Image (tube, rainbow, N blue to C red):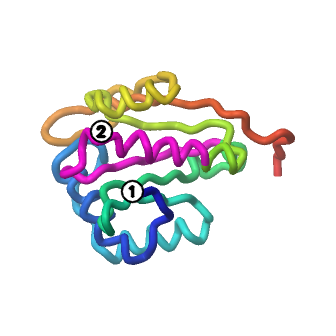
Amino acid sequence: MIRQAKKQDIPMILEIFNDNILHSTAIYMYNEQSLEERMEWFEQKQEKGEPLFVFDIKGEVAGYATYGSFRAYPAYRYTVEHSVYVHKDHYKKGIASKLMNALIEEAKASDVKTMVGCIDKENMASIKIHEKLGFNYSGTIRNAGYKFGHWLDLVFYQLDLDGPESPQEN
């Protein structure tokens, strides 16, 4: 079941996030986050009205997905950058695709014009999911990060949506 995240989900979200920091290049960070840091992140998402969905299996968070502002400048207001992470015990069950579909529907309802995924170039599973959902490759930043003893390339995928009927510049 996909639902909005609750405060009590944050410890499981933190576990998924920290596992990705420590064992993958999905997140270009070195150090685990604390529960306090993830709680602050959750509260900021709530204040901004940004979606945070979890995939709930019998009360356990098997994955989560969110999006937020792509860049801080006002002209980017119709573009979001999204993130989707699945617990290591639930890989290859279609959870990421289901969460992505929920995010896409939320973005459409919120007049988002462009969704951006920033993906490590070696993360073929994520790239394939994005392509399957209609995202198009839009560029690479070579040597964007350094982790696990080597340079990492970051690829961008975007999905163009309808956006607002009358976009505003204020």
Mark 1–mark 2 Cα distance, whole angstroms, equals 29 Å
Which element type, helix, strand or loop, lies under badge 2?
Answer: strand
Q: Residue at x 44, y 30 (%)?
A: 130
Which dot marks residue 55?
Answer: 1
Category of crowding for the residue at label 2, using alpha-carbon neighbours closer than 10 angstroms: few (below 14), some (14–19), many (at least 20): some
As displayed, is residue 136 above or below residue 37?
Answer: above
Camera-side residue of 85 and 27: 85
Q: Position of residue 85 (x, y in %)?
A: 34, 49
Residue 162 point in image, percent of width and height: 72, 34
Q: What element carries label 1?
A: strand
Most distant residue in the right direction: 166
- Who's the residue at 69% across and 50% down the image? 110
Nearest the viewer among 164 and 98 is: 98
Q: Quadrant of residue 151?
A: top left
Instruction: Please determine whether, in this image, residue 121 is positioned above or below residue 83.
Output: above
Question: Which quadrant holds the N terminus?
Answer: bottom left
Closer-to-camera residue (103/50): 103
70 vs 137, left or right, is right
Q: Which mark is residue 31?
A: none
Neighbour class for label 1 at 10 Å: few (<14), some, many (≥20)? many
Residue range corresponding to the magenta coloring: 79-105
Q: Does residue 13 sit above or below 117 in this rendering?
A: below
Which residue is disc 2 drawn over? 145
Place of residue 26 in the rendered image (x, y in percent of width and height, measured from the top left): 29, 43
Residue 100 position within the rendered picture, expressed as x and y whole percent measured from the top left: 47, 43
* 34 relative to 155 in the view: left or right: left
Amino acid on which disc 2 is placed: Gly
Amino acid under label 1? Phe
Residue at 61% in and 65% down: 48
